Amino acid sequence: MTQSKEIKQIKLPAEYQAEEQKKSSNIDRRRFMNYTGWVGILGGLGVALLGFLRFLFPRVLFEPRTVFKAGSPNEYAVGAVDTRYLQSERVYIVRENNGFYALSGICTHLGCTPAWLSSENKFKCPCHGSGFKRSGINFEGPAPRPLERLKINLAEDGQLLIDKGKLFRQEKDEWDKPEAFLYL
Amino acid sequence: MRGLKEKFNLEQLKNNLINSQVWRSMFRHGYEDTPRNRVLMVVDNLWLHLHPTKIRRHAIRIRFTWCMGGITFLLFLYLTVTGVILMFYYRPVGEYAYADMKFLEFDAPFGMFMRNMHRWAAHAMVIAVWLHMLRVFMTGSYKQPREFNWVIGVLLLTVTLLLSFTGYLLPWDQLAMWAVTVGTNMARATPLLGSEGPFADFVGVTPRLDARSALLGGTIVGPPTLLRFYVLHCIVIPLIASVLMMVHFWRIRKDGGISGPL
């Protein structure tokens, strides 16, 4: 059952149409002014917003330096996970038979500091229970990836030099890079 | 005695006051108890005009609404007042913030009371907002024509949680530091805007220039973070919340008042 409804077309009187056409140039100008006005206002606000967003990122940060010297290599016992720079720098320094690597003490889950449990031979995060082997590989808990290793080499005076600003990630195959492990 | 009573005729004094130009300039309508006058008194008053001029009987049934929206708003007012009072002593500077919190706690008269009021009202507001949402959901009050106000309400819920989160850092103790460390680390995983989130390489965000560093004002939770969270907590988010609340309350009225039992 379809009921067709007739739609009545409303026709404007001829003279009214002519008048409209005369007016149309005026309306175009008004439309143009309206448009440019809004473009100006929104454009200005947009630029101000971009400026504010850039304002949120200062050019200089007053944060602790990322590079520190960690003493002479022969101060470290072979096979030990050293915690002497944990409190001040949040870095674990591990001495293996053939060299050193530095592990960041920042949990890859949500940034707490995993503790080294030497009896269990693992790092354990107190916040949500993530566990990492001494190599830094994650094996339990919510941490999604291994601890980061930090750039390590020798300073001119023979001390260990560690840069926390340069990270090496195992999942990106960066642990094989020369500065991620110091061969001695 | 009689003369005294004529001199201090309270009825006369009241009439003089109410009919004075000063009074009439503030309150246009008298107290005449007619439906029309009652409507006019509500509509012509800035503070009352959001209120409905009349409500249905069921709207004041506590077992239907739990009055959770009203309680939430009342708690917001508490938090505004106690928060402003705390601002008289608190300095959002790395060196001072923790000491000022202690000062408020132990040295400022009623400081501990104000701080506890602020803290408990904050906890209560989060709970009340959830219960309000639960009530609206369970009574089906989110349905047409109130679906837009439900969306405003979800935004208000988010804003409440953000207020709670930004306020958490301000005592500047270990709990605050680590809670915000954990919280802002989640921002790393923001799609497009987080340095470790999806499409980070495509957008080109770095740890120095991403959503997290915008929140922190740097790359670690430090004094710039404290100041930033303070401004967000005391000015930016309350303003957003106030605007949303105005819309929320106005829409309740425009959508036909508090919804009735189904």
Image (cartoon, coloured by chain):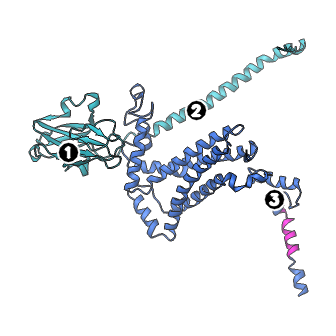
Chain colours: A cyan, B blue
Closer mark to the observer between disc 3 and disc 1: 1
Q: Which mark is residue A43?
A: none
In magenta, the rendered stretch is B10-21
Q: Quadrant of the N terminus of chain B?
A: bottom right
**Looking at the image, which is closer to me, B44 or B244?**
B244
| Mark 2 burial class by Cα count in 10 Å: few <14, some 14-19, many 20+ | few
Q: Residue at x 83, y 52 (%)?
A: B39
| Residue annotated with mark 2 | A44
In terms of secondary structure, where does tag 1 sit?
Answer: loop
Give, as a three-letter code, the residue at label 2: Gly
Whether callout 1 and callout 2 share a subunit is answered yes
| Mark 1 burial class by Cα count in 10 Å: few <14, some 14-19, many 20+ | few
Residue A22 falls in image quadrant? top right
Give, as a three-letter code, the residue at label 3: Phe
Q: Is residue B141 above or below residue B35?
A: above
| Residue annotated with mark 3 | B27
| Mark 3 burial class by Cα count in 10 Å: few <14, some 14-19, many 20+ | some
User: Mostly what secondary structure, the magenta segment?
Assistant: helix
In the figure, is residue B209 to the left or right of A147? right
Assess whether residue B258 is covered by the magenta stretch: no
Whether callout 2 and callout 3 share a subunit is answered no
Image coords of residue B186 (percent x, y): 42, 40
| Residue annotated with mark 1 | A121
Image coords of residue B227 (percent x, y): 45, 50
Q: Is residue B52 visible?
A: yes
Image coords of residue B250 (percent x, y): 71, 45
